Image (cartoon, rainbow, N blue to C red):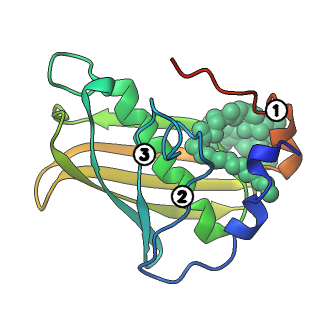
Amino acid sequence: MNSILGNWAEKFRPHPDGTQLPPHHGHCLGCGPDNPHGHHLVVQRRGEEVHAVHRFSERHMGAPGIAHGGAVATVLDDLFGFLLYLTGTPAVTRQLEVRYDAPVILGTSYELAARVVRDDGRKLFVEAEMSEVGGTTVATASALFLKVDIAHFDRGAPPAPVDLD
Ligand SMILES: CCCCCCCCCCCCCCCC(=O)SCCNC(=O)CCNC(=O)[C@H](O)C(C)(C)COP(=O)(O)OP(=O)(O)OC[C@H]1O[C@@H](n2cnc3c(N)ncnc32)[C@H](O)[C@@H]1OP(=O)(O)O
């Protein structure tokens, strides 16, 4: 097994309500603390939802001062990946839809929340929103994740020394 995922099984242990969930792995683009180009998303379990407060930086700029839509999609997709700690099974994104309701401003904090709306065999239907703190929704997302066997991840190249420049 790809060693970067080697401790994944223990990450599926029960996570009490209110606790911070572990990153998928150190170099994950969404949440890995060791990825200098990543978003460094920090996520908590809140009941049957996952929550985060996030600020986009200049590294994720689209229009001047505004987050790139792909960066917003990355963060929403990665947030969905934290629901797997609650469902207890590996799964991958099959389809992702994002609705951009308002520009996401760099350096501004946003609240994110995601949940599973239907767990149907291999299919996990999920939804999320991103909002100004205590205010207006700026983006919503829905996705279909498909549960996969751990062998799915063997197709990834073993983690080489990462050249992140
Ligand atoms: C211990 C170590 C653990 C390691 C733990 C790894 C950690 C992991 C880190 C996670 C981090 C997360 C980060 C964010 C999440 C990503 O970023 S995941 C990365 C992006 N996604 C991918 O790379 C997935 C690429 N796609 C694939 O590999 C394959 O298409 C899949 C998803 C495995 C599915 O292939 P498949 O098994 O052949 O599925 P398929 O038969 O086509 O469809 C299955 C069922 O779904 C239905 N379906 C398919 N598409 C649709 C659709 N769009 N709408 C409705 N139904 C559909 C089919 O009709 C079928 O239904 P049934 O006939 O069974 O009723």
| Amino acid type shown at disc 2 | Phe
Residue that carries the numbered disc 1 in the rendered image: 158
Where residue 159 sits, quadrant-wise, is top right
Quarter of the displayed picture in which ligand 1 can be seen = top right
Q: Do the residues labelled 2 and 1 touch (CB within 8 Å)?
A: no
- Label 1 is placed on what type of residue? Pro
Residue occupying image coordinates x 18% and y 25%: 66
**Figure quadrant of the N terminus:** top right
Of helix, strand and loop, which one carries label 2?
A: helix
Q: Which residue lies furthest to the left in this view?
A: 135
Asked whether the viewer can see residue 7, the reply is: yes
Q: Name the residue under label 2.
A: 82
| Disc on the earlier residue, 3 or 1 | 3
Relative depth, front residue between 132 and 27: 27
Q: Decide if residue 147 is in sight here.
A: no
- Answer left or right for 162 relative to 148: left
Q: Is residue 29 above or below residue 90?
A: above
Secondary structure beneath disc 3?
A: loop
Give the residue drawn at x 51%, y 36%: 35
Tell me which numbered mark, 2 or 1, is placed earlier along the sequence: 2
Give the class, few, some or many, for how many residues have Cα within 10 Å of label 2's Cα (few <14, many ≥20).
many
Give coordinates of residue 116: x percent, y percent: 52, 63
Residue at x 68%, y 61% (from the top left corner) = 120
Going 74% across and 45% down the picture, which residue do you hit? 4
